[in-house]
Image (cartoon, helix red, strand yellow):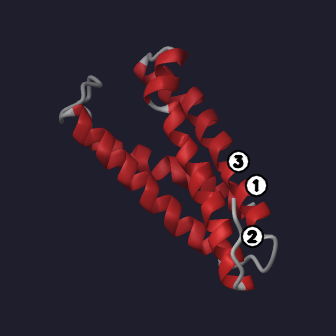
């Protein structure tokens, strides 16, 4: 349950932070590259913090858990975007995938990487991906 809640937070925190960057009419008020940078950094930071919290409660199978957490968070973020973000901005699915959707693969990459780091730290062995 905590994994699902954290997956929602990984999406919700950047969404809330994005709100002041838009006018009431939905126009972006800052440079698009600056905005995207803020979103990537914010999403990465909140994801890292929540991964640390989740992995502190895991005692084994770190890599497997990394894959599971990453996949769950990835799916949650895609579903929330498709249900909320796309209707708000009127973006078509192919544009979304190219501009936003593929970036969410970093969620999976970070989570699996955290699993490998935890596994290596626990076993003091080198595990290759």
Q: Residues within 10 Å of mark 1 (few under 14, many from 20)?
A: some
Image coordinates of residue 50 in percent, x first then y, are: 56, 66
- 15 horizontally vs 48: left or right: left
Identify residue for label 3.
71
- N-term mark: 1 or 2: 2
Per the model, the C-alpha gap separating discs 1 and 3 is 5 Å
Residue 89 drawn above or below residue 21 = above
Q: CA distance from mark 1 to mark 2?
A: 10 Å
Number of numbered labels in the structure image: 3
The reply to whether discs 1 and 2 touch (Cβ–Cβ < 8 Å) is: no
Q: Which residue is mark 1?
A: 68
Q: Is residue 111 visible?
A: yes
Mark 2 highlights which residue? 62
Residue at (26, 29) in percent of width and height: 24
Q: Nearer the viewer, mark 1 or mark 2?
A: 2
Q: Residue at x 59, y 41 (%)?
A: 77
Question: What SS does tag 2 mark?
Answer: helix
At x 81% / y 70%, what residue is drawn?
61
> Relative to 66, is 85 above or below?
above
Q: Which callout, 3 or 2, points to the residue nearer the camera?
A: 2
Please state which of residues 98 and 82 is positioned toward the viewer in this rendering: 98
SS of the residue under disc 3: helix
């Amino acid at each position: 349950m905590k994994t699902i809640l954290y997956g929602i937070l990984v999406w919700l925190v950047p969404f809330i932070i994005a709100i002041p960057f838009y006018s009431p009419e939905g126009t972006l008020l800052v440079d698009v590259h600056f905005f995207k940078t803020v979103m990537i950094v914010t999403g990465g930071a909140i994801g890292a913090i929540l991964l640390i919290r989740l992995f502190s409660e895991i005692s084994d199978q770190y890599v497997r858990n990394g894959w599971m957490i990453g996949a769950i968070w990835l799916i949650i973020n895609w579903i929330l975007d498709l249900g909320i973000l796309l209707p708000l901005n009127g973006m078509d699915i192919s544009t979304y995938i190219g501009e936003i959707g593929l970036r969410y693969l970093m969620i999976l990459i970070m989570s699996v990487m955290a699993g490998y780091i935890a596994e290596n730290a626990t076993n003091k062995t080198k595990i290759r991906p």
